[in-house]
Amino acid sequence: MTKLSNLLVPVAALALLAGCAPTFEARVARFQMLPPPAGQTFTVQARDPAKAGSLEFATYANLVRQRLTGDGFAEAAPGQASLVVTLDYAVGPPREKIETRPGFGYGGFGYGAWGYPGWGYGGFGRYGRYGRFGGFYGGGFEPWSYPEVYSTTQYNGFLAMRITRTADNSSVFEGRAETVAQTNDLTRLVPNLVTALFTNFPGRSGETVRVSFDPSQPGKPAVVKPGR
């Protein structure tokens, strides 16, 4: 039992670590015909008037502002923006998802036909080979598993951004980042969605990608894969 226990404990530990991994993943879709950033100025506003002027919106708008200035765009003086950046974000109602995962166990202790003790397989009466003197003997441990059924609460969150040109009010960028998370805390979701949306910004027009990264390691490059 000791050897099998030593084998299974690391497996269970790895499963636990995988379940607690901090990786954030989002699906990002972008359409764009942005002009080169040199000489372009912008201002950020809320799509929903109810969010305009709030400290929460100002926090998220500042994250977008930092990203745009880092990409070479300049923040505009009041009334002088060549581009208007419109933001929207929300998280949906909770929904339950039923999932399963394997369990682990040990073989049972059985007896041979003539009373000779032996280790059975799984404790279900299959006692191994036919032994000397007409008795049966067991074949050691055999792991068995019962699937464990459990439910998780999930939330759909999104961040949408549109950039329009003030000269003719035409759209030059439309992007959306979506994620499925186990939290509805916007203060955690929106900054990560901003990071996902601005990964490889402005992106290839009409392309949908999956962006994943570890929020606890901001200097580590995100992983970008094609996907819908």
Image (cartoon, rainbow, N blue to C red):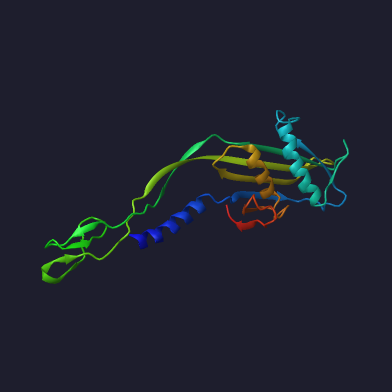
Q: Relative to 48, is 173 above or below?
A: below
Q: Nearer the viewer, residue 68 or 188?
A: 188
27 sits to left or right of 9: right
Q: Nearer the viewer, residue 157 or 216?
A: 216
Q: Nearer the viewer, residue 67 or 16?
A: 16
Decide if residue 66 is in sight here.
yes
> What residue is drawn where x is 59% and y is 45%?
179
> How far across and how far down the image is residue 125, in percent?
20, 57
Residue extending furthest toward the front: 2
Decide if residue 46 is in sight here.
no
> What residue is drawn where x is 55% and y is 51%?
21
> What residue is drawn where x is 21% and y is 65%?
128
> How far across and how far down the image is residue 189, in percent?
63, 42
> What residue is drawn where x is 54% and y is 34%?
93
> How far across and how far down the image is residue 187, in percent?
65, 38
> How far across and how far down the image is residue 146, in percent?
33, 51
